[in-house]
Image (spheres, rainbow, N blue to C red):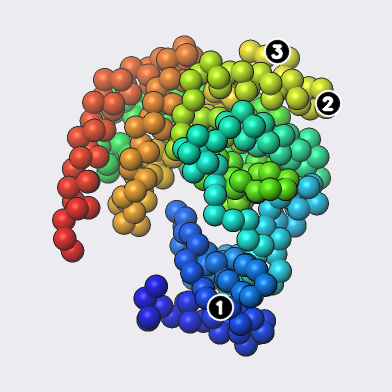
Amino acid sequence: MPENDARLALLQGWLARDLGLRPVRIERASSDASFRRYFRVVCDDGTLVAMDAPPETEDVRPYLHVTALLEPLGIHVPHVYEADVPRGFVLLEDLGSTHYLARLGAGGDAQRLYGDALQALAQIQLRGAAAAAQLAPYDRAPLARELALMPEWFLDRHLALELTAGEREMIVAAFEFLIGEALSQPEVFVHRDYHSRNLMVVAERNPGVLDFQDALRGPIGYDLVSLLKDCYISWPRERVLEWVSGYRSLLQARGGRVGGSPAQFLRWFDLIGAQRHIKVLGIFARLWYRDGKPGYLRDLPLTLDYVRETCRLYPELAALSEFLEHRVAPELPRANERVARQAAQPA
């Protein structure tokens, strides 16, 4: 770590002077798509994790608020030991360093891991009604704002497409359809990033759940599709459908709202997935052009494939499907190659 890291020095001072900790060492644990960083604080009697969230760009209060909502539900979120809100520091339970994506990549038992994750998600959705009521709604405004990221950052900026007026009108109509479908779903507690990089493999109450500070009250299918149509790892649709069916049965057996039929539940799953993945196309592109993080561009092809798959399945998205197949998909490899060359050039 750089010696002139002012935030790290401030964090070390907080740990020592305010909390009386004398770590053996402090090492970088992880970072994410935001400006937050995480450090593993190694002490003689164990390890902790310190979150560094610069107040000028991040606010730890939503994280603390959602922690307090999820922990009573029995969800294994990192316990908060201490927090300094003005300075943006939080001292947390250490859930280890093995996330689902790493364990799955090493040949881990997908059926057991996803079974645990689906059980935890059901617990959130079935027991979390009172908690969800304390969250802001995932309504038209955020849904529309997220969808708008894709034309701006992915189509215009990354692919450099010059859209016709007709194409822009078609995209607006498709987005309106997806917003309407999202708003028709039962509302539950929505984590909003419930996927393999935010689920940790832990010995007790697996999985450990991270990165939940942006939770909202919204569509029942959102977290399910985040997990099963993950932007970082994919599964054959047949297996995904088995998991979706099993999850619906789990909710139904416990009195959850699952729609009038399996087909309706699957429609909820697929169409909120299209909204999510369209949003993510914009976010991943923005992470390069605005924040200088090219690593997420490698995940654009899978994310686009999810959108293409759903558009092929639903007649209401036929025009968007044709646009993606003929105008978008051929351009993505070239755009990614261009950025790869730029990122490889010496500063």
Left or right of 224 in this view: 128: right
- The image's mark for residue 255 is 2
Amino acid type at circle 3 is Ser
**Mark seen at residue 24:** 1
Relative to 209, residue 245 above or below:
above
Q: How far apart are marks 1 and 2 (CA)?
A: 50 Å
- The answer to which of marks 2 and 3 sits earlier in the sequence is 2
Quote the CA–CA distance across marks 1 and 3: 57 Å
| Callout in the foreground (1, 3) | 1
Q: Nearer the viewer, mark 1 or mark 2?
A: 1
**Judging from the image, what secondary structure is the residue with disc 3 in?**
loop
Q: Residue 261 carries which label?
A: 3
Mark sitting earlier along the chain (1/2): 1
Mark 2 Cα-neighbour bin, 10 Å: few <14, some 14–19, many ≥20: few
Can residue 142 be seen here? The reply is: no
Kind of residue sitting beneath label 2: Gly
Residue 232 location, x and y as percent? 45, 38
Q: Where is residue 217 in the image (x, y as percent from the top left)?
A: 68, 42
